[in-house]
Image (cartoon, rainbow, N blue to C red):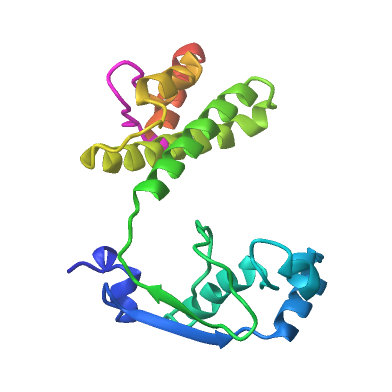
Amino acid sequence: MAEKDVSILDKLGVDVGFKTTYERTITEKDINLFAEVSGDYNPVHMNEEFARKTFFKGRIAHGVIAVSLLSAAMAKLPGLVILLTHSSRFMGPVRIGDEITALAEQRGIDTTAIQQRLAQSTANRLEILSRVYDKAPESARQGIENAIENSVKKYQRALDKLKEKNATGNVTDEETVMNRIQNKIRERLQINASNGVSVNQTREQQETQDQDRNREHNP
């Protein structure tokens, strides 16, 4: 297997199905500390007498305390693990004295969403670069052209991977993206707007052609 095909999970020796857990018994101190940190002093969490009159029939912990234990479980996974997003549904209240077990399980890597975000953000970047091109000083245009050329390639790679999965979703199609780039930039970089993306001309080839044109005008 080529090195570039080895996933981070393989490098860390983590198989799909690998699990870690974190257990904690919720205490009154936990609730009080969380209220102090978060500023959430809802009486259903802080006042037993008030809480008894609600449908909870007693004081309950902040739901986010239980959710936060997921971070502790995930931190036990090998490597650097960061919680970027999550979706929660509270099935019942957590009370003082309850023992909570948080479970983190490796269920594989789905790169589709990442590739979709990459393709769309690159498409947006191309449109912005094209807009600022004319307003930029001549000395900066070379750098903008380089950025456009690299972004086109990055967009195409991400889009190709999505097409293989039939998962382009709401990503802007390539013809629309390429047509947002000014004609003179497309011509200079040989970007084909009607038949997909084709960045075939290297910077060295372009410079050679420019030199040839200068010789024709200045024999």
Residue nearest the observer in this picture, 156 or 168: 168
Would you place residue 126 above or below residue 94 in this image? above
Would you place residue 123 above or below residue 97 in this image? above
Left or right: residue 63 versus residue 5 is right
Quadrant assignment, res 135: top right
- Asked if one can make out residue 3 in the rendered structure from this viewpoint, the answer is yes
- Asked if one can make out residue 219 in the rendered structure from this viewpoint, the answer is no
Does the magenta run of residues contain 157?
Answer: no
Q: Position of residue 43 (x, y in %)?
A: 79, 66
Which residue sits at x=51%, y=17%? 182
Left or right: residue 87 versus residue 65 is left
Q: Position of residue 186 (x, y in %)?
A: 43, 21
Q: Magenta-highlighted stretch: main secondary structure? A: loop
**Residue placed furthest toward the left:** 1
Residue nearest the observer in this picture, 142 or 115: 115
Left or right: residue 206 versus residue 50 is left
Does the magenta run of residues contain 193?
Answer: yes
Would you place residue 64 above or below residue 205 in this image? below
Q: Which residues are magenta?
A: 191-204
Q: Position of residue 61 (x, y in %)?
A: 66, 73
Image quadrant holding the N terminus, namely bottom left
Which residue sits at x=36%, y=20%? 175
Residue nearest the observer in this picture, 131 or 175: 175
Which residue sits at x=72%, y=70%? 52
Q: Position of residue 50 (x, y in %)?
A: 79, 67
Residue nearest the observer in this picture, 42 or 76: 42
Total labels drawn: 0
